[in-house]
Amino acid sequence: MNLIHGQLVSNEEAQAFLLRLNETMAQLLSRPALPRDAVIAACAKLADSIQMETHAPLLQAFGIDLQKAQSEIAEAKLQLSNAYLSERIRIELGNDYTREFIPLGEENLVRLNTSPLGVILHITAGNADALPVYSVLDGLLTENINLVKLPHDDNGLSILLLMELMRIEPRIAERVFVFDLPSSDLESLKRLADSSDGIVVWGGDEAVLAARAMAKPGTRLIEWGHKTSFAYLSSESIDEAALEAIAQNICETEQLLCNSCQGIYLNTDRFDDVLAFSERFLGVLDRVSAMYPRKDDLFVSAKRKIELYTRELELTDGSIKVFQTGRAAVVACRNSELTPSLQFRVPWVKPLPHNQLLEQLRPFRGHLQTCALCCDTANHTELERLLIRAGVVRITNPVNMSKTYCGQPHDGEYSLQRLQKIISMEL
């Protein structure tokens, strides 16, 4: 589905619109921007209209299980509220948008203020429900015009929410244009990129490289590439509650998000410790998995079993051992290399003594995000320091590994700031 001027249109109509895209964007940019206060008010009305009893079944119709639907509704009501968005603006952009001063050694008064980039292209991923909406919201809050390339597996929820926002605030229809284009349609994507002042790209390295190849020199790239997150355990007696929290994260997210726990590092150099812990953690993960039933995808289930079996056959030197039940699996590894998991409740466990932490993790610094750190109080500060130097940008306890808070940086940066520029004017 394509959304042009607030209306659902066919692919043929969307292609015709793309042919006159540059002209249309120039016309829209010549008009006054949509004030962020109007965007916040529209989002607040949308938040108030969302009701658990009514909309949880609707999300289930989009293929989201009830427990996750309830969680996402509660999160959406918070993140779309007036208080939440106003606080984000205060934290990320500050209250004072204009500054006038006489530069050192000069005589003329100068004014600095912020301005939207202009037109933002959002190339979104499908690993989080309604991600295009949240990406577009950043563009609206910074008073930009937004072009959206939907992910190939979008379930229609994003367009539904954006249309509701347009119903509440009709002016948004001239600030958001959504295109359902295959990634292979390079000509159309190039048209979108050529009309944009900035490109927000969500996805893996291939998606980021493709966006870089499309962007004109001078087009700002805002890259939210795939990141890897993990838990690091360093304690003589590892708390059972912490293990349950890690298992809950794995089950709730299915290890599909950038802040999902892909695996667990142990502060040890002994593979025997890894084997013993893996067997123990499988019991916890299996118990927690029973509390998070899922619709079994026969293809995913078969693929995972084949991959686990293949790994054991290929690595006959004892460098890995797979512990598994019908609901989950844990892959114990002798090596310390940071890798993605097989996902869908199959974490790895690896040894990583703290004195090798920097050496092992720093090569992956561009792909690190969250670490759930569990350790004795005496070692916490030193391990935090090492993780930060290695490239980790977020350190939490296991309970909050995939949770967000108002004003939280994204991958080490404030996203709203990246969608603006600073204008200098001599008065």
Image: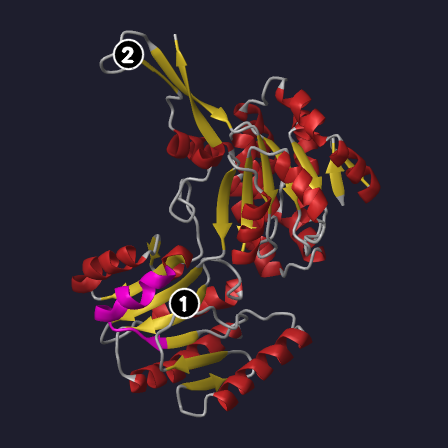
Residue at 53 percent across and 26 percent down: it is: 36
Residue ID at (40%, 84%): 279
In the rendered image, the vertical position of residue 329 relative to residue 58, given as above or below: below
Please give left or right for residue 226 compared with residue 5 in the image. Answer: left
Label 1 environment density (alpha carbons within 10 Å; few <14, some 14–19, many ≥20): many
Please tell me which of labels 2 and 1 falls first in the chain. Answer: 2
Q: Is residue 214 left or right of residue 250?
A: right
Magenta residues span 350-364
Q: Amino acid at mark 2?
A: Ile
The C terminus: image quadrant: top left
Residue at the left extreme, as displayed: 378
Res. 395 image quadrant: bottom left
Q: Does the magenta run of residues contain 369?
A: no
Position above or below: 284 against 74 = below
Nearer-the-camera pick, 144 or 38: 144
Question: Residue beneath label 2, please?
Answer: 102
Closest to the camera, between mark 2 and mark 1, is: 2
User: Marks 2/1: CA distance?
Assistant: 54 Å
